């Protein structure tokens, strides 16, 4: 009775597995004790049940089989094919060569750009960046202009001393020509020329050389029998050079040429 019940349950399990997996149902073998030795359909080779110890058609066997297949598929697809590795080996030197060329091109561009910036006059103009040096040259040239373009008939030596102190190079002869009439008429008309800088700006500053634009007011007073004063405005540019700690006027540009 128990053998028959076991056979019926086995057949039900096989039918359930077949319905789930879509496989054709297998016929359960008869118990070993109901088969005679040498009967048709019998074999001494152990079946799946004897080999695994678990029914071949049970859900546990199906899950184990699926898991094994998935694991095998993952292991088989984990490593790249041999052809892909070969292509990667071939492409790697080409990629490195391209990267080297790009880096070389960038280095050339950066060097060229740096040279262009160094050669750009606006980059060399310290008047845009060096506030201390710009203020220094502006203050000293303002004082120099006021001194050399002022003249008092009563003390001409003061004007000569200012020329020796603040002028150099071509500026000496230029100044001499510009004030020739004043020197000639000063003793007769008792002239007093006073120059006051109202505005000045450093146009360019590079090391020990600078160029400034100067705006000045001039008053010319005759102190004879009838005192008379005339006023005039002046605009000119000066080139300055630094000698030691002193900035001197090296050239005067009156924009008349």
Image: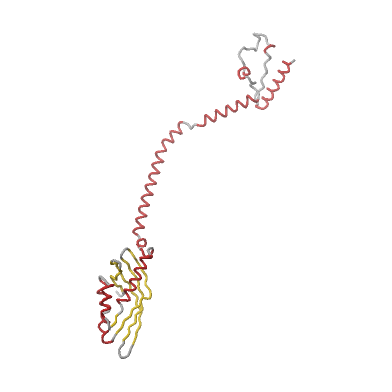
Q: Is residue 102 left or right of residue 12?
A: left
Q: Is residue 71 left or right of residue 83?
A: right
Q: Is residue 178 above or below residue 2?
A: below
Which residue does the image show at 73% across and 16% down from the upper left?
2
Q: Which one is in front, 166 or 123?
A: 166
Outermost residue, bottom side: 225
Image coordinates of residue 48 in percent, x first then y, are 62, 18
Q: Which one is in front, 33 or 136?
A: 136
Outermost residue, right side: 1
Location of residue 44 (image quadrant) = top right
The quadrant of the rendering that contains the N terminus is top right
Q: Which one is in front, 162 or 226?
A: 162
Q: Is residue 50 above or below residue 134?
A: above
Q: Which one is in front, 241 or 180?
A: 241
Image coordinates of residue 38 in percent, x first then y, are 64, 8
Image coordinates of residue 62 in percent, x first then y, are 63, 25
Image coordinates of residue 40 in percent, x first then y, are 65, 10
Location of residue 23 (image quadrant) = top right
Which residue does the image show at 37% across and 52% down from the upper left?
110
């Amino acid at each position: 009775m128990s053998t028959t019940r076991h056979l019926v349950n086995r057949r039900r399990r096989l039918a359930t597995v077949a319905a789930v997996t879509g496989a054709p149902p297998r016929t359960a073998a008869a118990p070993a004790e109901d088969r005679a030795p040498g009967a048709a359909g019998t074999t001494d080779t152990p079946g799946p049940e004897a080999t695994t110890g678990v029914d071949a058609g049970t859900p546990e066997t199906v899950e184990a089989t699926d898991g094994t297949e998935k694991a095998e598929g993952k292991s088989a697809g984990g490593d790249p094919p041999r052809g892909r590795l070969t292509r990667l080996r071939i492409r790697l030197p080409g990629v490195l060569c391209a990267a080297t060329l790009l880096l070389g091109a960038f280095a050339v561009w950066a060097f060229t750009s740096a040279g262009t910036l160094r050669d750009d006059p606006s980059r060399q103009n310290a008047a845009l960046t060096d506030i201390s040096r710009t203020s220094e040259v502006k203050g000293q040239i303002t004082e120099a202009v006021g001194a050399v373009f002022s003249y008092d008939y009563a003390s001409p030596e003061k004007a000569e001393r200012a020329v020796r102190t603040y002028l150099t190079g071509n500026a000496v002869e230029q100044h001499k020509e510009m004030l020739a009439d004043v020197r000639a008429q000063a003793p007769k008309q008792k002239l007093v020329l006073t120059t006051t800088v109202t505005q000045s700006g450093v146009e360019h500053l590079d090391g020990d050389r600078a160029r400034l634009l100067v705006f000045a007011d001039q008053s010319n007073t005759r102190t004879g029998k009838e005192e008379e004063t005339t006023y005039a405005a002046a605009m000119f540019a000066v080139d300055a050079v630094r000698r030691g700690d002193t900035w001197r006027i090296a050239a005067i540009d009156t924009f008349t040429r």
